Amino acid sequence: MNILVCLKQTFDTEEKIVIENGEISEDGVEFVINPYDEYAVEEAIKIKEEQGGEVTVLSVGPSRAESALRTALAMGADKAILVDDESLFGDEYTISKVLAAVAKRDSYDLILGGYMAVDDGSAQVGPRLAEELDIPHISTITGLEVNGDKVKVEKDVEGDTEIIEASMPVLLTAQQGLNEPRYPSLPGIMKAKKKPLERLTAGDIGINPDEIKAKTEVLDQFLPPKKEAGKILEGELDDQVKELVQLLRNEAKVI
Amino acid sequence: MNFELSDEIQMLKKSVREFVQHEVEPVAMQIEREDRIPDEVIEKSKEMGLFGISIPEEYGGLGINMVGKCAVYEEIGATHNGYTTLLGAHSGIGTVGIVEMGTEAQKQKYLPAMARGEKIGAFALTEPEAGSNAANLKTTAVKRGDKYILNGTKHYITNALVADVFTVMAVTDPDKGAKGITSFIVEKDFPGFKVGKVEPKMGLHGSQSAEIVLEDCEVPVENVLGEEGRGYVNALKILANGRAGLAARNLGSCQKLLDMSVRYAQERVQFGVPIIEHQAVAHMLAEMAVDIEALRSLVYRVAWMVDEGKRVIKEAAMLKLFGSEVYNRVADKAVQIHGGIGYISDYPIERFYRDARITRIYEGTSEIQKNIIASQLNREYSK
Ligand SMILES: Cc1cc2nc3c(=O)[nH]c(=O)nc-3n(C[C@H](O)[C@H](O)[C@H](O)COP(=O)(O)OP(=O)(O)OC[C@H]3O[C@@H](n4cnc5c(N)ncnc54)[C@H](O)[C@@H]3O)c2cc1C
């Protein structure tokens, strides 16, 4: 089985976001594999361990994204591809075009990714990529079984579980709950440095950057307004209730 | 000069940090109460590869240099010291003898299983009559045919209860003093090998130190480690090698104590302000931070010297001494800054305070380190 996992390097979710001159500052920030993509990496490695095959991890991003790919290799992926070419960075439209071009260089039975990236949260790249490749996709999966050339997935639907079967090739995006990603073991980290990591540019994948320019534009970035300190009501219970109703009506304007 | 750790070592550090935070820290209080490390934690540590830290790659270990080892030890040091002592005694004094002095056959036989943690290592030098004066061993080894017969008692041996493979020093030629000592690889299943009394102790819960009783213990000649008569030198070498690792673990514990102390001092309010605003408290934090930075520099400098193949007898002793004394100073201040909570056993601070105390005693007391440093100075200045 040939598995491709698309992953993005994102800020560690515990990082504090700082905006400087309208840009999010990367100064001293710790980067990680986007947590949803990490479920995808874990799932791919599990399938490989149980059924054999090869896992390729793919990212479009700056050189620093190499460390996310190395982490995936340390967890057990076999090879990595980094599209490290600024002319190919853009929005979801651009990225899915680039990923599709790389995916087409080989034939993959299964393509996995996170259902969204924790930084921009668009949840578009997976489905867009499936469309580009003209294969079916199932998003936000929480369970996966691979049998022959079929997959059986579980996904949450408004508190119920939906079970869907599909034939490969198929693209699946991971939701929290799919698995518990392993830590890269120390021997895994040592082995990762010897695994192949291919770097590609627009020329290598035959793309003209001008043709896939971003369709969207970021106009402004700002932090949410600071939370005001909470108010604790005091006095007799009756008075508190009255005050609360009054506040909900006049101040919070929710009733 | 370059103070950056390589990408790969940073990755090792990060992975160990996360492992320790998620798998060991949550059970630290339990380890302390039960004086036992849960099997699950040991199993997961094996899967992580934590038992192969000092074993070369060709024998299934990590194959990292001393700088890399110290980086890993620093992260391990941030959690329960009983757990870190189990790992440290295995990877430090427990395996290094076989790695450095073992024959190819010995390495093939023991190291792969030790790297996987299937076999745990220990080091047995100390005896009731031979503590700081380690050459004063009474345990004897007499050659009989293709075996040595060992007789004697070792005490305070870390990992005695869990270890499978012991590096044991015994006297093969009583007339030659320190030059009549030989080291042996002794398996726990060899006839005549017995674990004796387990010593209850002030700290390092979860790590057991016990007596080892050798009664006509049969050790095959192929298990002589290094040359006959070189056992004392071997022991000193193994201990010197362990020193950087121990200091790196102490460094991790110190950093953890500083993290906890700064946070506590920012949150705890007395006299209307966070106590960090009281200069006496702030100065304690500053002193802790300076000690820790100085220790960090010395750890990685000595580790680098080891990797460069430089002679480190004096520097390793300085590091053992400084690392242990700093850990004790830092732990003392951490208790002080935490006030009553620092003394209460439902919080981790007092545990670090007790665990810190042993570092000035084992693997050579602070006084012995000063003796080594001074005798090296004397030598240097006599040239
Ligand atoms: C928890 C624990 C774990 C241990 N683990 C191991 C292990 O795994 N393997 C192992 O072989 N040993 C182990 N030891 C033994 C440890 O290394 C010794 O306890 C230590 O070396 C001190 O020896 P001693 O206890 O006999 O003290 P002593 O040597 O009797 O020392 C008593 C005091 O006298 C001082 N002193 C002695 N000689 C001199 C001198 N020449 N100059 C100045 N001061 C001196 C010492 O510094 C100390 O303050 C362990 C001990 C403990 C407590």
Image (tube, coloured by chain):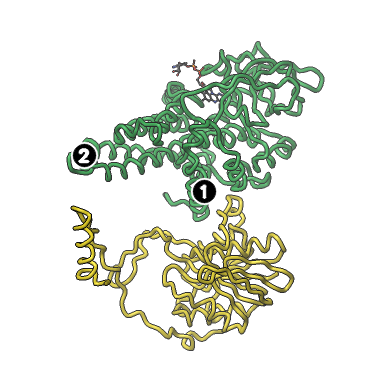
B109 is higher (above) or lower (below) than B146: below
**Viewer-proximal residue among B370 and B19:** B19
Question: Which amino acid lies under the numbered mark 1 shown in the image of this protein?
Answer: Phe
Quarter assignment of residue A195: bottom right
Residue A71 locus on image (x, y percent): 54, 59
A155 is higher (above) or lower (below) than B63: below
Label 2 packing within 10 angstroms: few (<14), some (14-19), many (20+):
few
A86 is higher (above) or lower (below) than B92: below
Q: Quadrant of the C terminus of chain A?
A: bottom left
Callout 2: SS? strand
Residue A53 locus on image (x, y percent): 70, 66
Look at chain B in the picture and name its colour.
green
Is A205 left, or right, of A212 in this rendering?
A: right
Q: Residue at x 55, y 45 (%)?
A: B65
Furthest toward the right, the residue is B145
Residue on which disc 1 sits: B19
Residue on which disc 2 sits: B270
Q: Chain of mark 2?
A: B
Quarter assignment of residue A30: bottom left
Q: Chain of mark 1?
A: B
Q: Which chain is yellow?
A: A
